[in-house]
Image (spheres, helix red, strand yellow):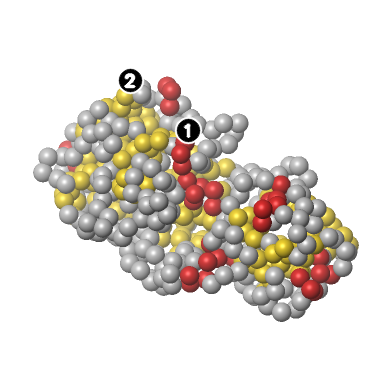
């Protein structure tokens, strides 16, 4: 199973595959390759594209640890292909159904493009965010044997190894097609691999209202005027804090204080089968009790941090930690009543067995599941300490969100326990995990501890099961975070899965 990954706190959205086998030898297609048919449907494969004359691969240029290989307008070059290709040499080739293809970098999620659509001979090609323009669309045609020509739709010019060079770093350009090895390309099929989704990543590059937030998850909605929309509750939030040059001030103190301890956003429903990822189209909503801060605070606490939720009828039920400083002192279930849309009324429910303890934080996902004909919501949590890798599960009736029972290792009990055997899994990586149901499978996605800069191991993992509390597959590494800024790797933690954006064997994370 392949998974589509989104790292919200780091404002990056990634795609990963469960079946990733990076040590498999490369295979060269002898005729039309098995190209992917659309962005989220049909066959999916990853490729390198190598020049038939130089045998070198098209890659994204730039210095890795400065984050340049993620940049808009970064120029393309050729380089000797690695035995295990790096993702800046890997490409998705996506059939647009028009006789043309989008060629997408797995590393950055951006698209192979002609700058400005200019017809200049010898112009170096670049990567750029997908705009669906003809300068980003390519005709891929078999010339002979395993050689392909790749022609831009806007310019009619062919992808070219400039000057027929065999040197690493030579520019990849466009020129009139002359039918020789400088313009012949091998499309080398790889094992399916993970990739970053640049379109969804840009959804979190917000410039007004909630401009950044420390943790966010999504709740698909079906009620009333919200049918088909998506709710995005957030934790600590910066508000209208983007400077004129697009930057923001440093975290902490008076330079960049946290404006709100929580907020909430509503994303439009699909139109024509497509999601709207324009940041300006997803707006902040307010609650009757707390305005833009949306969730009220329990008396004696300084914050409410929502994490995990589900819609039932006209209500969305959201789990939230509550506390002061960096210490959680309680937890609550918050009922968002949508019965009087566009008004949202938020009430903290009384759930004594769950909210009266802090040993287990049920902040790792909610799933609707029918067991023996009874409709439940399963709620997943971790042991005490933010980074605990022990997984616990509780559940409540969909008809009674205040009455919880807790799995103790052998039965459903009236109170939670961390006694030996109660955890359904132990020893997950410390960077957090999330549990969701995708394609009728229960999925746990987890990540290495990343609450700090320059942490070397930055991997993402998945497990699968047909049962909500047992039978989990072995942990499988599916991705390594590629992000760098100014020579350093950033902080990352708190993953979330977003099943409503999934299709076939892909999963948004």
Of 509 and 253, which appears nearest the observer? 253
Q: Is residue 42 left or right of residue 218?
A: right
Number of residues whose C-alpha sits closer than 10 Å to that of mark 2, classed few (under 14), some (14–19) or many (20 or more): few
Q: Is residue 112 left or right of residue 340?
A: right
Mark 2 and mark 1 lie on one chain; the one further toward the N terminus is 1
Q: CA distance from mark 2 to mark 1?
A: 18 Å
Residue 387 vertical position relative to residue 86 in the rendered view, above or below = above
Residue 254 vertical position relative to residue 259 in the rendered view, above or below = below
Residue 480 vertical position relative to residue 236 in the rendered view, above or below = below
Of 308 and 489, which appears nearest the observer? 489
Q: Quadrant of residue 327?
A: bottom left
Residue identified by numbered label 2: 340
Q: Is residue 474 left or right of residue 173?
A: left
Residue at 54%, 72% in the rendered image: 63
Of 157 and 357, which appears nearest the observer? 157
Residue at 36%, 55% in the rendered image: 248
Q: How far from the left and from the top, in percent, is residue 161?
A: 76, 69
Residue at 26%, 50% in the rendered image: 258
Q: How far from the left and from the top, in percent, is residue 418?
A: 23, 54
Q: How far from the left and from the top, in percent, is residue 100?
A: 75, 48
Residue identified by numbered label 1: 268
């Amino acid at each position: 199973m392949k998974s589509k990954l989104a790292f919200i706190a780091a404002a990056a959205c990634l795609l990963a595959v469960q079946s990733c086998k990076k040590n498999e030898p490369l295979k060269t297609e002898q005729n039309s390759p098995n190209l992917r048919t659309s962005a989220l449907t049909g066959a999916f494969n990853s490729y390198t594209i190598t020049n038939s004359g130089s045998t070198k691969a098209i890659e994204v240029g730039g210095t890795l640890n400065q984050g340049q290989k993620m940049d808009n307008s970064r120029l393309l070059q050729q380089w000797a292909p690695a035995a295990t290709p790096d993702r800046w040499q890997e490409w998705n080739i996506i059939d647009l159904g028009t006789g043309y293809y989008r060629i997408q970098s797995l590393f950055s999620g951006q698209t192979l493009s002609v700058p400005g659509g200019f017809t200049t001979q010898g112009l170096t090609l670049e990567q750029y965010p997908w705009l669906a323009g003809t300068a980003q669309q390519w005709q891929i045609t078999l010339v002979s044997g395993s050689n392909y020509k790749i022609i831009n739709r806007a310019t009619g010019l062919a992808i070219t190894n400039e000057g027929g060079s065999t040197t690493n770093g030579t520019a990849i350009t466009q020129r009139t097609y002359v039918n020789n090895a400088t313009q012949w390309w091998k499309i080398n099929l790889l094992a399916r691999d993970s990739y970053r989704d640049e379109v969804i990543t840009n959804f979190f590059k917000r410039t007004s209202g909630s401009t950044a937030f420390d943790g966010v998850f999504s709740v698909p909605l079906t009620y009333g005027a919200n049918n088909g929309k998506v709710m995005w509750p957030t934790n600590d939030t910066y508000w209208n804090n983007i400077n004129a040059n697009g930057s923001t001030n440093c975290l902490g103190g008076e330079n960049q204080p946290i404006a709100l301890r929580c907020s909430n956003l509503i994303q439009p429903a699909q139109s024509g089968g497509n999601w709207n990822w324009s940041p300006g189209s997803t707006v902040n909503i307010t609650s009757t009790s707390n305005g833009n801060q949306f969730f009220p605070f329990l008396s004696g606490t300084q914050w409410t941090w929502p994490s995990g939720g589900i819609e039932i009828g006209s209500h969305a039920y959201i789990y939230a930690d509550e506390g002061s400083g960096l210490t959680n002192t309680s937890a609550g279930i918050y009922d968002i009543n949508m019965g009087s849309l566009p008004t949202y009324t938020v009430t903290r429910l009384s759930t004594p067995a769950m909210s009266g303890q802090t040993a287990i934080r049920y902040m790792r996902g909610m799933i609707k599941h029918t067991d023996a004909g009874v409709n439940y919501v399963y709620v997943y949590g971790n042991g005490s300490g933010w980074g605990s890798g022990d997984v616990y599960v509780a559940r409540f009736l969909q008809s009674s969100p205040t009455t919880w029972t807790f799995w103790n290792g052998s039965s459903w009990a009236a109170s939670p326990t961390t006694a030996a055997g109660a955890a359904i899994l132990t020893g997950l990586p410390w960077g957090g995990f999330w549990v969701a149901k995708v394609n009728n499978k229960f999925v746990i996605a987890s990540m290495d501890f990343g609450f700090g800069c320059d942490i070397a191991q930055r991997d993402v993992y998945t497990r699968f099961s047909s049962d909500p509390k047992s039978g989990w597959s072995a942990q499988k590494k599916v991705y390594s975070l590629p992000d760098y800024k100014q020579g350093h790797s950033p902080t990352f933690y708190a993953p979330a899965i977003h099943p409503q954006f999934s299709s076939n064997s892909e999963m948004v994370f």
